[in-house]
Image (cartoon, grey):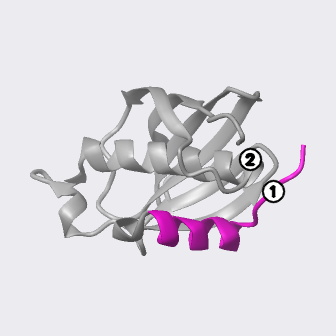
Amino acid sequence: MELKMSAAEVENFLEEVYPQMAGRFAVEELSAMQARVRLKVTDADLRPGGTVSGPSMFTLADCAFYIAVLGMIGKQAMTVTTNCSIDFMRKPIPGDLIAEVVLHKLGRVLAVGDVLMRSEGVEAPVARASVTYSIPPVR
């Protein structure tokens, strides 16, 4: 399977359909069935105790998976999350988070895969998400 959109094309499309998210993410790598996406953590993402909040980590998992799927299927903004389960494993350090996405299945109707999240510069993952997306029919 080949990409239908490059990293730059996906970032431009996201700015078009989700302008409120502009500048929050950087697509560092995008290849067939895989992506690496950076969440640019700000003070709004931190919670008491000096760590990145769970909702920010969920946003990263969900958006990184969306980016990987869009790279494979093209401009289909109405591709949506149908399931996301996250295991929070370690306290992330304040700073950017990196998500590595692997799509295990990409069918006509569903995309299924995993997202592994790490604090920048730290090898041990802070969270793992199992994600399923629904792909709208092409019209």
> At 33% from the left edge and 65% from the top edge, which residue is drawn?
41
Height in image: 54 above or below 46?
above
Name the residue type under label 1: Lys
Q: Is residue 50 visible to the viewer in this orientation of the structure?
A: no
Please state the extent of the stretch shown in magenta in the rendering: 1-17
Tag 1, which secondary structure? loop
Question: Which residue extends farthest left?
Answer: 48
Residue located beneath label 2 in the image: 73
Name the residue type under label 2: Ile
- The quadrant of the image that shows the N terminus is top right
- Write down the quadrant of residue 8 in the picture: bottom right
Asked whether the residues under the numbered discs 1 and 2 touch, taking CB atoms below 8 Å apart as contact, a structural biologist would say yes
Residue located beneath label 1 in the image: 4
Height in image: 134 above or below 60?
above
Give left or right: position of 123 versus 10.
left
Give left or right: position of 66 versus 139.
left
Tag 2, which secondary structure? helix
- The quadrant of the image that shows the C terminus is top right
In the image, residue 11 lies in the stretch drawn in magenta = yes
Instruction: Kindly report the distance in space between the C-alpha atoms of the residues bearing marks 1 and 2.
Output: 6 Å
Q: Main secondary structure of the magenta part?
A: helix
Could you tell which of marks 1 and 2 lies nearer the N-terminus? Answer: 1
- Write down the quadrant of residue 24 in the picture: bottom left
Q: Nearer the viewer, residue 39 or 96?
A: 39
> At 27% from the left edge and 41% from the top edge, which residue is drawn?
54
